[in-house]
Amino acid sequence: MYEGKVEKNLDFRSDTVTWPSPEMRQAAAEAMVGDMGYGEDPSVNELERLAAEKLDKEAGMFVTSGHQGNAVAILAQTGKGDEIILEARSHIYSMEKGHWAVIGSLVPRLIKGVDGFLPSDQVRANIHGSVNEGFRTSLLCNENTNLAAGGTAIPVNQMREMYDTGKELGLQVHTDGARIFNASTALSVDVKEIARQADTVQFCLSKGLAAPVGSMVVGPQDVIDRAKNFRRMLGGNMRQAGIIAAPGIVALTKMVDRLQEDHDNAAYLGQGLEKLGFKLSFPVKTNMVFVDLTSVGWGKEEWVSACAKSGFKTGVRSPERVRLVTHYGIERENLKRLLEDLASII
Ligand SMILES: Cc1ncc(COP(=O)(O)O)c(C=O)c1O
């Protein structure tokens, strides 16, 4: 049976490229199933219960992707014409095709975060004074870990400050926690501590946790009930979804503890690249390494050619910057080989 190794497929583009572990494949094969649309899929129900328990929320729901999870959480906590506060470089604002505008008729108020943190004075400055002005600001979203800040983990005290400010202003607070378990690992806190600083949280099973498909949304029961209607609207009302929920249960119960290995590997990779003369765009905090190519006089072309020679894949973020993400299936020996290849090419 498949061993869970990426082998020659040295794919550093993202943690979304992980393949399911042998245990996940086994779980999928043996999954109990029912009709999720009728609430009768035992594996989905167990996964939803487990997700809510792990993040200490009232209820959980299984969605097809992080994108869908953010969309339904936002739609469930806003009304048409409302304003929502988003970080200017957040995944929700920049990568999700504007579901908040197209489906929600929501107006974004953008704040440039400081390493993902939205300072209280800026949040306050983005709230319209009164309903008579014709706008209602209803939701504040943040993202932890924070991609635009190099995969950094926003500390709990900053998450709390954003939550408290939101609550003081009468807002709901949603956390895009696609990689919330990477955040809790990096901060050495229980994930509940981070989740407590938001009304709703979306997190992905299919990134560092290596499940093949799916994300979870957790929050208060009434919000989750509303979000389920939007999930149906968006085509996420799956049927015998236990086949994909069962690997999600393995992801939550077996894969969280190994995230530290990915972080250690990213730190090792970052140090190795620095020894070769590359500058890193951000300190390595979780499983992401952002490299400034100009520091060795390279551009995108040189990097792409090095990748082609050595057989690894990375995400090219701009003409000068690339991103490497460590994840399940990438091991220390792979990193050593990558660094040796780069050294010989340089
Ligand atoms: C921070 C963040 N939020 C949300 C998503 C969306 O997740 P998905 O690809 O499952 O739709 C991603 C995907 O990479 C992400 O990085």
Image (cartoon, rainbow, N blue to C red):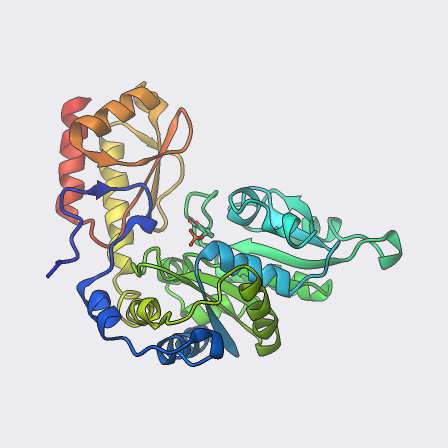
- Residue under the image location 35 percent in, 59 percent down: 213
Say left or right for 13 vs 67: left
Estimate the x, y position of residue 59 in percent, counting from the top left.
Answer: 51, 77
Above or below, 262 against 310 in this view is below
Question: Which quarter of the rendered picture does the C terminus lie within?
Answer: top left
Residue 310 on image: x %, y %: 16, 30
Q: Is residue 85 left or right of residue 260?
A: right
Q: Residue at x 28, y 75 (%)?
A: 31
Query: What residue appears at the point 51 percent right and 61 percent down from the top-left corner?
Result: 235
Count of numbered circles on the image: 0
**Which residue occupies the foreground of this view, 173 or 267?**
173
Q: Quadrant of the N terminus?
A: bottom left
With 291 as the anchor, is 219 left or right in this view? Answer: right
Residue 334 in view (yes/no): yes
Does residue 112 appear to the left or right of 342 in the view shown?
Answer: right
Picture coordinates of residue 49 (x, y %)? 43, 79
Give the farthest residue toward the left: 1
Residue 132 location, quadrant: bottom right
Image spot of residue 146 (x, y percent) = 47, 49
Residue closer to the observer: 17 or 176: 17
Q: Is residue 260 above or below residue 16?
A: below
User: Can residue 199 be spotted in the picture?
Assistant: no
User: Which residue is most to the top?
Assistant: 297
Eyeballing the image, is 169 above or below 334?
below
Determine which quarter of the picture holds residue 209.
bottom left
In the rendered image, the vertical position of residue 184 relative to residue 86, given as above or below: below
Q: Nearer the viewer, residue 242 or 117?
A: 242
Direction right: furthest residue: 132
